[in-house]
Image (tube, grey):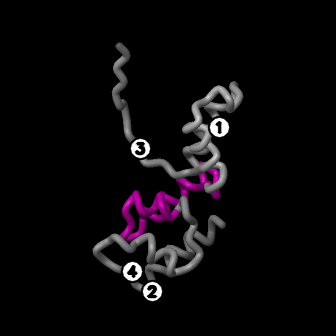
C-alpha cells in the first residue's frame, strides 16, 4: 500500500500554479495526463494574467496593507480587479468594509501590474 502525506501547504496564485503545471508537462505530451489535470491546466492557462513572480510580488505588496489577508491578496492577484465594485465583491464576505481611500490604494497597486 502506498501512503501519501501532506508535507507542506502553501497558498498559490493561478499564475504560480500555471508555471508548476507547465514544468510538469514539458517533458511529456498533455495526452499522458488525466482528464482532470488537462482541464485544470486549461483553466490556469485561460485565467492567469501575470507571470508567477509578478503575481507573488503583487501579493506581497498587497499584504502590506492594513486590512489585507493573504487569501484575499491571492484572490486579487488572480482576478486583477479594475474597479471599486470588483474589489468590494472580493471583500463581500468580510465583516468590515473598505473606505474609498483603501479601495483606491488597492486599485493603484493592481494598476502597476497591468
* Of the image marks 3 and 4, the number of the one nearer the N terminus: 3
Q: Which mark is residue 22?
A: 1
x and y percent of residue 106 in the render?
Answer: 50, 73
Q: Within 10 Å of the Cα at label 1, are there few (<14), some (14-19), or many (20+) other Cα atoms?
A: some
Establish if 113 lies above or below 8. below
Residue 56 is inside the magenta segment: yes
Q: Within 10 Å of the Cα at label 4, are there few (<14), some (14-19), or many (20+) other Cα atoms?
A: some
At a point 43% along the width and 48% down the height, the residue shown is 11
Location of residue 96 (image quadrant) = bottom left
Q: Quadrant of the N terminus?
A: top left
Q: Which mark is residue 98?
A: 4
* Of the image marks 1 and 4, the number of the one nearer the N terminus: 1
Q: Quadrant of the C terminus?
A: bottom right
Q: CA distance from mark 2 to mark 3?
A: 31 Å
Tell me if label 4 and label 2 are in contact, CB under 8 Å: yes
Q: Which mark is residue 10?
A: 3
Identify the element where label 1 is drawn. helix
Q: Which mark is residue 44?
A: none
Residue pointed to by mark 2: 100
Residue 15 is inside the magenta segment: no
x and y percent of residue 85 in the render?
Answer: 50, 80
Q: Nearer the viewer, residue 96 or 56?
A: 96
At a point 37% along the width and 16% down the height, the residue shown is 2
Q: CA distance from mark 2 to mark 1?
A: 39 Å
At a point 54% along the width and 75% down the height, the residue shown is 107
Establish if 47 lies above or below 104. above
Q: Nearer the viewer, mark 1 or mark 4?
A: 1
Q: Nearer the viewer, mark 1 or mark 3?
A: 1
Identify the element where label 2 is drawn. helix
Amino acid at each position: 500500500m502506498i501512503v501519501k502525506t501532506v508535507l507542506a501547504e502553501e497558498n498559490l496564485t493561478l499564475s504560480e500554479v500555471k508555471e508548476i503545471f507547465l514544468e510538469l508537462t514539458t517533458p511529456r505530451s498533455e495526452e499522458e495526463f488525466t482528464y482532470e489535470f488537462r482541464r485544470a491546466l486549461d483553466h490556469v492557462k485561460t485565467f492567469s494574467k501575470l507571470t508567477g513572480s509578478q503575481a507573488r510580488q503583487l501579493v506581497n505588496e498587497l499584504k502590506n496593507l492594513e486590512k489585507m489577508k493573504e487569501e484575499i491578496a491571492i484572490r486579487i492577484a488572480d482576478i486583477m480587479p479594475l474597479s471599486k465594485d470588483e474589489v468590494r465583491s472580493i471583500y463581500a464576505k468580510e465583516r468590515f468594509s473598505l473606505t474609498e481611500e483603501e479601495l483606491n490604494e488597492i486599485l493603484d497597486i493592481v494598476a502597476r501590474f497591468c
